[in-house]
Image: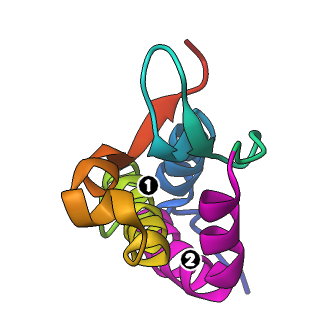
Amino acid sequence: MTVEIEDEDLGFDAVVAALEELARFEIRAGVIGDDEVLEYAPSVEARTGFIRDSIDANNDRLGNTAEEFIGQAIDLAIDPIVALQVIGDDAEDIIIEGIEDRDLVSTGAMRDSIIGEVQDVTR
């Protein structure tokens, strides 16, 4: 009795490529510009309390968003960069929600300055 086994790639190479793509990028959120930057990123300590406090207070929420969308990227359901941008947008929303009662927000200046972005860390 001879048993034939056929080895078929069911997408492992594509999953590895998606993970490699994700590893090239970092999500940053805060007031991000060329000069003075107030931000949160995994490799950057937030330079002001309202950003750090907002992120820390919503760590579970941000983790759930990351788990959902990184999972979709690994499953090849969405583009990895789209997944990261959704997480960045959620971090942006978290920071804005954390400062909504401050004076700068009532003028819109602070609210309009907060952004979430995906940055290529290999550049």
Q: In the image, is residue 30 above or below residue 108?
A: above
Q: Is residue 45 above or below residue 88?
A: above
Residue at coordinates 50% horizontally, 65% vertically from top-left? 74
Q: Amino acid at mark 1?
A: Leu
In the foreground, 36 or 105: 105
Q: Quadrant of the N terminus?
A: bottom right
- Which residues are drawn in magenta? 48-75
Q: Nearer the viewer, mark 1 or mark 2?
A: 2
The local crowd at label 2, few if under 14, some if 14 to 19, many if 20 or more residues have their Cα within 10 Å, is some
Residue 105 included in the magenta stretch of the image: no
Name the residue: 76% across, 40% down.
43
Q: Is residue 17 visible?
A: no
Secondary structure category for the residue under label 2 = helix
Nearer to the camera, 10 or 85 = 85
Q: Looking at the picture, how far across and down is residue 72, in whole percent? A: 41, 73
Q: CA distance from mark 1 to mark 2?
A: 12 Å
For this view, does 49 lie left or right of residue 76?
right
Q: Which residue is mark 1?
A: 84
**Residue 21: x percent and y percent?**
51, 39
Q: Residue at x 52, y 63 (%)?
A: 8
Q: From the image, tell me which residue sits under label 2.
A: 62
